[in-house]
Image (tube, rainbow, N blue to C red):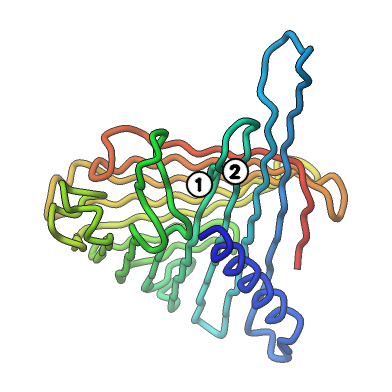
Amino acid sequence: MKKTVFSLVLLLVAIAINAQETATDTTKLWTKKGNISLLFNQSAYNKQWLGGGTSNIAGNFGLNYDFNYKKGDVVWDNKFILAYGLTKIKGDEKTAKTDDRLELNSLWGKKAKGDWYYSVFFNFKTQMDTGLDKNGVKLSHLFSPAYFQFGPGMLWKKSNNLSINFSPATAKLILVHDHFTELGPSFGVLQGDNSRFEFGASISGYYKFNIMTNVGIENRINLYSNYLDNPQNVDVDYQMNVVMKINKYLSTNVSLQAIYDDNSVQAVQVREVFGLGVNYGF
């Protein structure tokens, strides 16, 4: 499975780079910008070290690619996110997954007045590799679960770095393999089923800014309320990515994600990745 995932990562990177290198944008309708990062973390202790600690090595790959369209009163913003990380602790036979995301966001808008647009949005997110708990029990794998959201609404877009989209009629679909629901519900999908349909309201926000030279922060948040089941329980997905550039190719990256979805677990899920590595913008 690990070989399959790495093959997929390399294929997507090749496609992204090739698309950037071969595209001829003579009309300036498309704005394309991407970033590839490779982060490495390593700790080592010899047997005489009295302070405690376990030797380990970890690596994280990230691809963040924007391809946005603008012509007249029509805008179409797209963002593709791919992230994958592994860690190996001395003494453990297997590697452990530290990051695993595959996400596509697409937002189309037609100007209504001022900074307001009539909009339609689409969101897809899943993971690529198998996820295990501390006892080795399988919790997830490729496209299981997979989340889809789609709906019309209104977009307020001040700039490419600041926007909010309101969608009061959003359809949401959750897919899981039926072996995850054999003994009970999983990710909100009922026992014996492999999908769950929801209909509700969605609010998505995006804000990117620089707090100082060579230090940029990108914030993304999505709020969702299901009209059909406990609408007061709002699902929250917040993501923050901080890039601190050392030079053209080296940077320190901090990635933070906080999720609340009571259908999955009635607690806040937090993921944080920090590392120094190679950074390439294209």
Residue sitting nearer the eye, 203 or 239: 239
Residue situated in front as seen by the camera: 66 or 144: 144
The residue labelled by disc 1 is 239
Quarter of image, res 242: top right
Determine the residue positioned at 55% across, 51% down.
Answer: 207
Q: Of the residues shown, which amino acid type is indicated by label 2?
A: Ser
Q: Which residue is mark 2?
A: 255
Rounded to the nearest angstrom, the CA distance separating label 1 from label 2 is 8 Å
Q: Secondary structure at mark 1?
A: strand
Q: Please state which amino acid type lies under the numbered disc 1.
A: Gln
Residue at the spot x=57%, y=39% of the render? 93
* Residue beneath the point at 63% across and 81% down: 30
10 Å crowding of disc 2: few (<14), some (14-19), many (20+): some
Q: Where, by quadrant of the figure, is residue 88 drawn?
A: top right
Percent position (x, y) of residue 150?
31, 69
166 left or right of 78?
Answer: left
The reply to whether residue 159 is visible in this rendering is no
Residue 165 screen position, x and y as percent: 40, 61
Q: Nearer the viewer, residue 72 or 242?
A: 242
48 lies left or right of 204: right
Q: Position of residue 228 (x, y in %)?
A: 12, 55
- Is 25 placed left or right of 141 in the picture? right
Give the image quarter of residue 252: top right
* Figure disc tally: 2
Label 1 Cα crowd, 10 Å radius (few <14 / some 14-19 / many 20+)? some
Secondary structure found at label 2:
strand
Q: Which mark is residue 92?
A: none
Sequence-wise first label, 1 or 2: 1
Q: Can see residue 24? A: yes
Asked if the residues shown at circle 1 and circle 2 are in contact, with their CB atoms under 8 angstroms apart, the answer is: yes
